[in-house]
Structure formats: C-alpha cells, structure tokens
Image (cartoon, grey):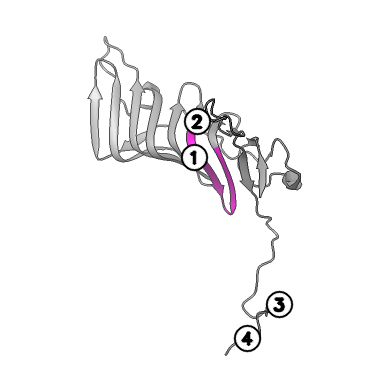
C-alpha cells in the first residue's frame, strides 16, 4: 500500500501512475468527476422543513440529491437557496435557485465511475465544487484512497485528497493519505488451474 501526505487526481482514481510504489506526492488519472452543475437537482427525503425567511430547506432521513448522473446521499441536507420577493419565493428544488448544499452523516457522493464517502460534505453549486471532510474514502473498482478531506473541482474534474493536520495537544506525527491501486493486469486464478501448494483438484 502506498502512503502519501496528499493525492491530487485529475478526475478519477484509475490509472494513477504506477510510480505510486515509490511514494509520490501526487497521482494523476483520466478525468472522471467532471459534472454539469446547471442540471436540475431532485431531492427526496423522509422529512422536509423550510425556513422561508432565511431561505433554508432542511431534508432529513434517507436523503438523496440527484443531479444528472451525480448523487449526493446523507442523513441530513441543508439547502441554501435564493429567492425574489417581488416575483415570489424560488422553490428550493429549482436548479437556478440553489446556492449551496451542506450534508451531514453518512455522506456519499456517487458517480457512474466512482464513490466517495465522508462524515460531512458541502456542494457549492455557484462555485462548481464539492468537498468532503472526515474519514474520507474514494473508491473506483478495486482502487481505494483514504484521507481526511476531499476537494473536487467539477469543471476541471480535478480532485485533491489531504490528510488531517497533527493535533496541537498530542504533538504526534502528521496523518498521511493512503492509496491502494490494483493493476488491471493482475493475474487471476482459473477454476481449472492448481495453485502452488494447493494440492490436486477435488472431484
């Protein structure tokens, strides 16, 4: 397993240069997390509470926010939206009205190629960016990257994973990003092949 302080990805996890065995400071891959944040956002949940004055909609219980092929799931979502008092309040589900989404508890970001999870997350719609904090895990197939914070630029597809800073009180060593990459050409055992030391096949 490769261990680094920071991993910078041009999109997805796959195909990071196999120089990771030499513990590089960055790994690069094909663009995967590019996303059109102007698409409509559909949010489903068990409960919705709206604070009209502050223009905040809070969704709780099995929350899923779907935008195109991107899905943001969490125990709780707080949606900050804009409105026009003269033209009436904008609906929080309208794409153009949502400015920011804050996610709490079992946060997952899912795309067709990858899944990212963390304890909390923020989707800044206006800034075309996503972030996750706390026990972050990125998964694509058998490839896994672990860290404390993930930042995604949805325009460029560039992702950045960083480790937690050391505690001022503890004074221990700085945490590190951990990356496990599985080669696509890794050998796989065939049912009819006998592995070394495995003994003869049984009938």
Q: Describe the element under mark 3 as helix, strand or loop.
A: loop
Q: Nearer the viewer, residue 114 or 84?
A: 114
Looking at the rendered image, the disc whose residue lies closer to the viewer, 4 or 1, is 1
151 left or right of 109 in image:
right
Q: Describe the element under mark 4 as helix, strand or loop.
A: loop
The answer to whether any part of residue 66 appears in the image is yes
* Disc 4 target residue: 201
Q: Residue 196 carries which label?
A: 3
Q: How many marks?
A: 4
Image point 73% across, 42% down: which residue? 23
Looking at the rendered image, the disc whose residue lies closer to the viewer, 3 or 2, is 3
Mark 4 or mark 1: name the one nearer the start of the chain: 1
Segment colored magenta: 130-147
Q: Nearer the viewer, residue 42 or 64?
A: 64
Mark 3 or mark 4: name the one nearer the start of the chain: 3
Q: Position of residue 71 (x, y in %)?
A: 43, 40
């Amino acid at each position: 397993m490769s261990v680094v302080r920071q991993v910078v990805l041009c999109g997805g996890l796959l195909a990071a240069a196999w120089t990771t065995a030499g513990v590089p400071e960055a790994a690069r891959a094909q663009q995967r997390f590019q996303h059109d944040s102007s698409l409509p956002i559909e949010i489903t949940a068990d409960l919705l509470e709206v604070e009209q004055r502050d223009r905040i909609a809070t969704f709780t219980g099995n929350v899923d926010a779907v935008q195109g092929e991107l899905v943001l799931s969490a125990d709780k979502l707080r949606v900050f939206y804009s409105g026009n008092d003269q033209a009436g309040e904008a609906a929080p589900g309208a794409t153009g009205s949502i400015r920011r989404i804050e996610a709490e508890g079992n946060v997952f970001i899912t795309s067709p190629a990858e899944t990212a999870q963390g304890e909390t997350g923020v989707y800044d719609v206006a800034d075309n960016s996503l972030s996750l904090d706390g026990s972050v895990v990125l998964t694509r197939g058998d490839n896994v990257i672990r860290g404390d914070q993930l930042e995604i630029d949805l325009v460029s597809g560039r992702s950045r994973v960083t480790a937690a800073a050391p505690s001022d009180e503890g004074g221990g060593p700085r945490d590190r990003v951990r990356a496990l990459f599985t080669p696509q050409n890794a050998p796989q055992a065939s049912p009819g092949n006998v592995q070394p030391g495995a003994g003869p096949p049984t009938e």
